[in-house]
Image (cartoon, grey):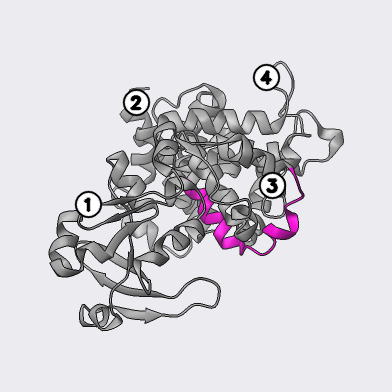
């Protein structure tokens, strides 16, 4: 990418254009850069000639922007001179993100970010880095899911105050973005453990904080004790089984209904599957989550209890479960959910899915019967299910 950038920008500008922030961090770590973030001490006409346009902002410095393959988005912070670069870097979040590298290869590291990078330590650029932008706290928790660690000084800052009012300045969408990114990382459970440890984020996700006071279930089935511990264990096991963020998210909140079961139903939580499915729409709407994620979480809450009992189910119930899983978009990871939650498997699940996908014609049902208006819809559905069960039995050799 650096070679391509050097070809894109005229050579006379190379010493005045720097990679900055996470881009330098990724280059030094030898991993692919996700975004092209530059700082340039060049005349503005040079940028506009190259196709950049000014994007003004009330809350952050203005940038010059253009989209160009193969880079995608290129964002340039304009500087009046290279003397302004150290000040720009000092306003960033952590020292590992406060380095600059010119296109001709010179590293500018005024805050000592490279040693912190080698130790994978997150050290704040200034004592006010986190108060200047509280979203940086959530970013730090997300970075910790990739093996980084906040240093003792940053942890002391986090413990020194109540951050609720500061975090209320952040749109819930920004929180959800960081949460979903964290869920896709190597150690996703750490994001939520750190929230609880520092008492940060209850205004966005009060459910996580309530889980710690709710029994996960009867002690003989849930020796881990509370719902928070159980949910994170399921998330951790799911993370070992799939990189899919949707499956991991659903694993974490599969027992959402246990937060709402009456206390006199503790610790068994009878009916928590249906109750959780009822709560999902409001939960996802509050977090501004995508509709597909809501649909998947609702299906997981509603179906996971039956899925855990898969081998006890009648064939017709298995097929209905497969139909509902397809409708909810969870058919690919529902068996993984069972493995992560119940330490069980779903033998014959693929057969049930194949049968569930067959239409009436593929099942060999007489078209005249389908078009007969005298046959009640309920009766027709029973006939279709009978054919599906027969097909499943033939497929399994039962």
Q: Position of residue 27 (x, y in %)?
A: 29, 46
Whole-angstrom CA distance, mark 4 to mark 3, is 31 Å
Whether label 2 touches label 3, CB < 8 Å: no
* Nearer the camera: disc 2 or disc 3: 3
- Residue occupying the far front of the picture: 83
Whole-angstrom CA distance, mark 1 to mark 2, is 64 Å
* Nearer the camera: disc 4 or disc 3: 3
| Mark toward the start of the polypeptide (2 vs 4) | 4
- Left or right: residue 68 versus residue 357 is left
Q: Secondary structure at mark 4?
A: loop
Residue where numbered disc 4 is placed:
221
Residue at (41% x, 62% y) in the render: 372
Say which of 134 and 308 sits in front.
134
Whether label 1 touches label 4, CB < 8 Å: no
The question of residue 229 being in magenta is answered with no
From the viewer's perspective, is residue 140 above or below residue 51? above
Secondary structure mostly seen in magenta is helix
| Mark toward the start of the polypeptide (2 vs 3) | 3
Residue where numbered disc 2 is placed:
396
| Mark toward the start of the polypeptide (1 vs 4) | 1
Residue where numbered disc 1 is placed:
105
* Nearer the camera: disc 1 or disc 4: 1
Whole-angstrom CA distance, mark 2 to mark 4, is 31 Å
From the viewer's perspective, is residue 327 above or below residue 312? below
Residue where numbered disc 3 is placed:
200
Say which of 136 and 90 sits in front.
90
Whole-angstrom CA distance, mark 1 to mark 4, is 59 Å
From the viewer's perspective, is residue 237 above or below residue 288? above
Instruction: Specify start and end residues of the magenta stretch as a single range.
Output: 160-181
């Amino acid at each position: 990418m650096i070679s391509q950038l050097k070809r894109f920008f005229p050579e006379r500008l190379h010493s005045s254009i720097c990679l900055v922030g996470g881009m330098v961090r990724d280059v030094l770590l030898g991993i692919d850069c996700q975004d092209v973030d530059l700082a340039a001490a060049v005349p503005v006409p040079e940028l506009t000639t190259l196709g950049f346009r000014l994007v003004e902002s009330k809350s952050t410095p203005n940038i010059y922007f253009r989209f160009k393959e193969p880079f995608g988005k290129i964002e340039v912070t304009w500087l009046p001179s290279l003397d302004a670069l150290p000040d720009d870097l000092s306003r960033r979040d952590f020292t590992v993100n406060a380095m600059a590298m010119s296109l001709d290869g010179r590293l500018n590291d005024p805050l000592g970010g490279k040693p912190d990078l080698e130790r994978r330590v997150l050290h704040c650029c200034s004592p006010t880095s986190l108060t200047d932008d509280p979203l940086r706290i959530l970013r730090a928790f997300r970075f910790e899911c990739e093996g980084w660690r906040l240093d003792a000084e940053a942890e002391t800052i986090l413990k020194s105050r109540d951050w609720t009012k500061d975090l209320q300045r952040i749109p819930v969408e920004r929180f959800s973005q960081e949460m979903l990114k964290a869920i896709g990382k190597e150690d996703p459970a750490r994001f939520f453990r750190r929230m609880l440890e520092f008492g940060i984020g209850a205004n966005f996700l009060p459910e996580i904080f309530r889980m710690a006071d709710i029994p996960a279930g009867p002690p003989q089935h849930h020796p881990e004790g509370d719902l928070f511990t159980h949910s994170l264990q399921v998330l951790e096991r799911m993370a070992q089984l799939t990189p899919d963020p949707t499956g991991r998210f659903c694993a974490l909140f599969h027992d959402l209904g246990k937060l709402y079961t009456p206390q006199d139903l503790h610790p068994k939580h009878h009916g928590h599957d249906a109750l959780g499915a009822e709560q999902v729409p409001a939960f996802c709407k509050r977090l501004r989550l995508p509709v597909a994620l809501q649909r998947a979480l609702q299906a997981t809450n509603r179906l996971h209890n039956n899925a855990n009992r898969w081998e006890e189910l009648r064939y017709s119930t298995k097929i209905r479960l497969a139909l509902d899983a397809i409708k909810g978009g969870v058919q690919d990871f529902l068996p993984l959910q069972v493995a992560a939650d119940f330490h069980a498997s779903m033998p014959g699940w693929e057969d049930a899915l194949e049968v569930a996908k067959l239409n009436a014609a593929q099942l060999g049902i007489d078209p005249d019967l389908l078009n007969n208006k005298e046959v009640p819809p309920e009766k027709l559905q029973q006939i279709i299910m009978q054919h599906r069960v027969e097909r499943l039995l033939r497929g399994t050799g039962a």
